[in-house]
Image (cartoon, grey):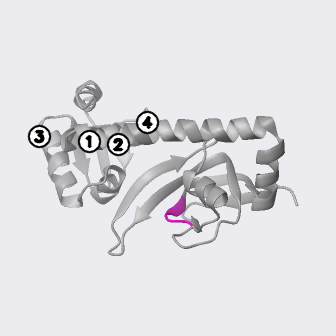
Amino acid sequence: MTAIPLHQPIGAVLFRAGDECPGYVMVNTGCIRVSLVSANGREIVLYRVRPGEICLQTFACLVEGRPYLAEGIVEAEVSGELIPPNVFNHRMATDDMFRQKVLGAVAHRFAEFEHVVETLAFAGLEQRVAQAILQLAGGGREVRTTHEQIAAEIGSAREAVSRQIAALARDGLVAAHRGVIEILDRDGLSQLAEAAM
């Protein structure tokens, strides 16, 4: 058996904690959000999987033969391939180019995790909220999100994030509307985010 075509719409649940791993996901287009969800429903976003990137949860499940510990939700319609475990293991053992690509993606993802840990350890909440707003906005001026979603991005409580967004609004850096945060002063917000490191 070779790779299986994979097409999933926005909102599709690719895996949940406790699920067995059906294979290695290669994303060609779209985005998967990988999160830990507590028993009381609180979420923290671990990372996103975009084209050329690796899902560490999937990699660990395949290598260790264990079920998922996190949840994967399609954030932007996904098109790609699912490589069954036996095919993945065979390619890792025999295909040098495939193995280098996978291990390179693992190393890159690990570097991202180091940055996340560094930010959590050394950045204040204000800086982390500014970073999250800029990251979610990309090059745009607006972020369509909720305070709860930003809290999940940075591993904080919604109430604390709401207070920080209100402070950023008082400082003229953003304007908060229902479900939308508008960036008013990108340079000022960037300076605040960079002050974290």
The reply to whether residue 18 is in sight is yes
Closer to the chain start, of discs 2 and 3, is 2
Residue position for label 3: 170
Residue 76 position in % (x across, y down) = 56, 52
Instruction: Say which of marks 1 and 4 sits in front.
Output: 1
Name the quadrant of the N terminus.
bottom right
Residue position for label 2: 117
Q: Which mark is residue 121?
A: 1
Closer to the chain start, of discs 3 and 4, is 4
Camera-side residue of 39 and 65:
65
| Alpha carbon separation for disc pair 3 and 4 | 23 Å
> Which region of the structure is painted magenta?
68-73
| Alpha carbon separation for disc pair 1 and 4 | 24 Å
Camera-side residue of 111 and 180:
111
Mark 2, residues whose alpha carbon is within 10 Å: few (<14), some, or many (≥20)?
Answer: few
Closer to the chain start, of discs 2 and 4, is 2
Instruction: Say which of marks 3 and 1 sits in front.
Output: 1
**Residue at the (55%, 66%) spot, across then down:** 68
Mark 4, residues whose alpha carbon is within 10 Å: few (<14), some, or many (≥20)?
Answer: few
Q: How many marks overall?
A: 4
- Based on the displayed image, in which of its 4 quarters is residue 58 positioned? bottom right
